Image: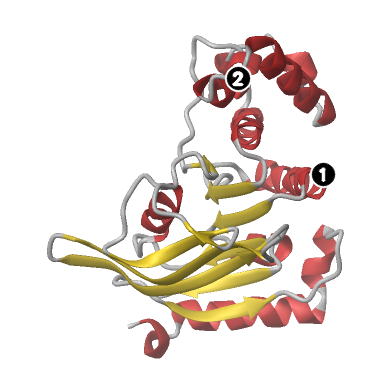
Amino acid sequence: MNSLKLSVQNLSKSFADLKVLDNINLSIKNGEFVSIIGPSGCGKSTLFNIISGVEIQSKGEIFIDGVECKKRKGETGYMPQNPSLLPWATVEENITLGLQIKKQPVKIAKKRAEDLLKEFGLFEFAKNYPATLSGGMKQRVALLRTILFHDDFLLLDEPFGALDALTRTTLQIWLMRVWRKTKSSILFITHDISEAVLLSDRIYVMTQRPATIIKEVKVFLPRPRKLENLTRPNAVKIESQLIELLFNKNEIE
């Protein structure tokens, strides 16, 4: 099996005369957790849209499992910034939506959903509707829906960005637990530097638009991770490096 789940090579994207992405190169190994950080509006979500097949790049190649992949819809589990749950559907019905799209038999889809809900502590909410759930609970359901659609390779675009600090921290810990269980390859967008350090094996830093990658930062912290890992000198040093890369005008202008 190819050791790389994803390889993005020399990728650029323009909308008419507006160049958004410029010569992006990045990769993810199988089972690796990789984050992308960069200024707001620099094109991180556009990059995800391209990788997932929602958008088409202007130039460059995308390889999944070592094979150039031109039609990528269905090759990833993609959770966008606002992964709205269907208000008229129960939790169970919402997370099986992707399997219905794939035309998986209803009994098999329900069994997979039931197993996943039990494993990650949501089974008691299976018959609830989204309106009865907290913001953090809705994000858990949206994440399980994404995993159930494609648990091998996940694109998560700021999944916790709209949550309060305490709920966000709880969800970060929960996501690490889910990741250890699923062994998914994850590409994760965040504006939270501490979140990137806590979760990631590696972090790519993007510039302002037209965005390119100016640095790949490796995170040498033991796993499984705990919040106290962020107080280690190595973690503090990584955060300082990322802050300098993001806010040093000589680097990003």
Question: Toward the viewer: 2 or 60?
Answer: 2
Image height of 241 relative to 38, above or below: below
Image quarter (top left, top right, bottom left or bottom right) of the C terminus: bottom left
Please state if 52 lies on the left or on the right of 32 as rendered.
Answer: left
Image height of 81 relative to 242, above or below: above
| Residue 89 seen | yes
Residue at image coords 71%, 60%: 1
Chain-order first, disc 2 or disc 1: 2
Binning the other alpha carbons within 10 Å of mark 2 as few (below 14), some (14 to 19) or many (20 upward) gives: few
Which residue is tagged 1? 181
Residue at the far left: name it.
17
Tag 2 secondary structure: loop
Residue 7 location in percent, x, y?
A: 53, 66
**Quarter of the view holding residue 186:** bottom right
| Residue 128 seen | no
Residue 152 location in percent, x, y?
A: 66, 46
Which of the two discs, 2 and 1, sits closer to the camera?
Answer: 2
Residue 208 location in percent, x, y?
A: 35, 72
Please state if 179 lies on the left or on the right of 129 as rendered.
Answer: right
Query: Gap in Å between the C-alphas at discs 2 and 1?
Result: 23 Å
Binning the other alpha carbons within 10 Å of mark 1 as few (below 14), some (14 to 19) or many (20 upward) gives: few
Which residue is tagged 2? 104
Please state if 137 lies on the left or on the right of 114 as rendered.
Answer: left
Image height of 66 relative to 167, above or below: below
Residue at image coords 78%, 18%: 123
Question: Toward the viewer: 147 or 88?
Answer: 147
Residue at image coords 61%, 21%: 96
Residue 171 location in percent, x, y?
A: 70, 43
Tag 1 secondary structure: helix
Please state if 35 lies on the left or on the right of 237 as rendered.
Answer: left
